[in-house]
Image: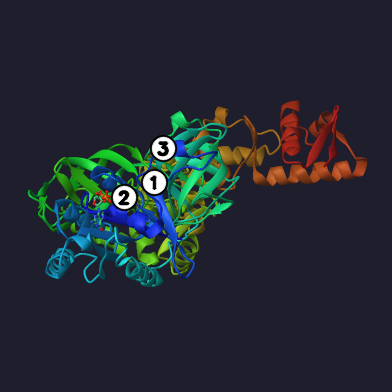
Amino acid sequence: MYVLGTAGHVDHGKSTLVCALTGIDPDRLPEEKEREMTIDLGFAWFKLDGGQEVSIVDVPGHEDFIKNMLAGVYGINAALLIIAADEGVMQQTREHLAILDLLRVDKGIIVLTKKDLVDAEGLELARMEAEEAVKDTTLEGAPIIAVSSTTGDGIPELKTAISRLLEITPLPRDIGRPRLSIDRRFAVKGFGTVVTGTLIDGKLSVGQEVEILPPGLKAHIRGLETHKKKLDVAVPGSRVAVNLANVPAERIERGMVITTPGWLTTAQFVDVNLHAVKNLPRPVMHNTEVTFHSGTTEAAVVVRLLDKQKLNAGEVGWAQLKLDRPVAVAKDDFFIIRSPQGTVGGGQIVDINPRRHRRFQASLALNLQAKREGTSEEIILATLEGSGPSEYERLLLACHLDAAEFKKALDDLLKNGEVIATGVMGLHQYIFSKSRWYALVKEVIALLDNYHAQFPTRRGMPKEELKSRLKIATAYFDGIIRQFSDDRVLVEKAAIVARPDFKVKFTAEQQVLIDAYLKELAVNPYSPTSPDEMNITAEMLGALAADGKAVIVAEGVVFSPAAYEEMVKRVVTQMKKQSKITVAEVRDLFQTSRKYAVALMEYLDAQKVTRRTGNERVLC
Ligand code: GDP
């Protein structure tokens, strides 16, 4: 399905031409004429000789053109630039042409209308003027066809030219992420909410759940229609009426976007490649306030120029736009900015929700350039470098690549170590560029080395402390720690992390106490004095346990590993003999007190060596 857009000065014969091509008068009044759900989409269509259906979006007023041109820009595969032969190129012709140029619409036909009102010389003049006007624009070299919509002269030739043009026009892309920027909405009796727009980037199907952004409403598609025909599936590049279930019409506004749930986000900041129009009277200054248009969305924006003090007519620069409200746009979307005096400039979105950048940084321009024009691998790397680590889905969205292509490029980057992924695919996976990952490794090593130097008697840093020092979200932290641990950056000991080669260093006084305590554990293996009583702190005891020099069985009950092993062995042997054992029997076995016997048996229960039944234990 192809969509043609008309452009040109008011009264130059756009609507009359559409009518001559299609037999449909695009100016007639909309929905009152219609029955049932059939909605006038504000467009006409016709069949080419080859059977191909072509939609033509035609809008009456100049301001409407600006908005609708953008609304359909991805859907609009080609433009008809209409110039009345008797008047020639006018101010609005130039502005529309500038917009087509900014939006990179490079397939088009220049139609000289009202051929019947001029003689051969007048027609030639108009042709030369048109050629001159499109010079250095995307429409330079476009075919020029003269017609009279009133007599029909030239209309067959125009149709042939349209056929030829569409033969070389690529089909609208389908990347499986449908978006429909809403241009109109109605409440239709018996059907409920109906919205219209041009569908881009993917298909929509009846019954499908969709999300409407902003604000993120959920709805179902009850019906779809294009060219007044009901459809089960609408394809990209078509003008579509969507009947929505579960959402009242009052909640829908022009500028909202219908899409599949879960992937598109709204943005209030975007990085862009900004072209100033050629006939700009005054340069675009840093912090200029203008109106932003993309799709059917409109918002007030402040333009932060990133690599220039000002942007002169015809110049290109990088900018960050700050919007006055969230809009649902995606990377690579086209936009224009306008002031009350006219179109100021436009270009393509390079990044959604970027960080605030420092101005005049050489690395920033390179990063934005890679995001805009690089290979898939370069785009992924530039996004990870510029915006930091990201989850898979968020990264896919930020890169705005085809899902299969993104996966392949990311796999290649992972394989050759340019990118590091922590966590598990689909579950808290967090993806880093190599340089950001090694910067993090360096930071962790420095943090732990400092910690060990500051607290030599502690076994390591609590994980929670490391998490808050690194400012890493809880969801990703475990995966990151696991990766550090696999890479031997650190070792994990329950809630503590340390450098792999770190050993606790006790003070001389502590060492004396520890030596005395270890001696006590050896001398009184089954009823040793509690660590407290021997001035052994929890920290010291923890270090001994981690070092394999003590087994903490319960609060105040600690055995040497040799004693503990011996006790387990004897308890198990005894139980094998008599199939069960009581605390009193354990006590007698080791000639110890009830306190130690109870602690040991509860510990063995917890270790699933034994199981308690009444006053006795059996083997698990
Ligand atoms: P739009 O504002 O560009 O849509 O212009 P319209 O289609 O409304 O046309 C403006 C006026 O020019 C109308 O009065 C039309 O009848 C007239 N017109 C349009 N095309 C032709 C043409 O090819 N020949 C003549 N003689 N008049 C035309």
Count neighbours of disc 3 (C-alpha within 10 A) and say few if under 14, some if 14 to 19, many if 20 or more: many
Residue visible at 54% across and 47% down in the picture: 224
Q: Nearer the viewer, mark 1 or mark 2?
A: 1
Label 1 secondary element: loop
Circle 2 sits on which residue?
A: 70
Circle 1 sits on which residue?
A: 42
Residue type at the position of mark 3: Pro
Label 2 secondary element: helix
Left or right of residue 125: residue 226: right
Q: Going from the N terminus, do you reach mark 1 or mark 2 first? A: 1
Q: How many marks?
A: 3
> Separation of disc 1 and disc 2 at Cα?
15 Å
Q: Nearer the viewer, mark 1 or mark 3?
A: 1
Q: Going from the N terminus, do you reach mark 2 or mark 3 first? A: 2
Where residue 424 appears, x then y in whole percent? 55, 53
Residue visible at 43% across and 37% down in the picture: 185
Closer to us: 271 or 209: 209
Identify whether 151 is placed above or below 504.
below
> Separation of disc 2 and disc 3 at Cα?
18 Å
Q: Quadrant of residue 96?
A: bottom left
Residue 349 visible within the image: no
Closer to us: 249 or 357: 249
Left or right of residue 212: residue 325: left
Circle 3 sits on which residue?
A: 214
Single out the residue that lies furthest toward the front. 151
Count neighbours of disc 2 (C-alpha within 10 A) and say few if under 14, some if 14 to 19, many if 20 or more: many
Left or right of residue 47: residue 345: left
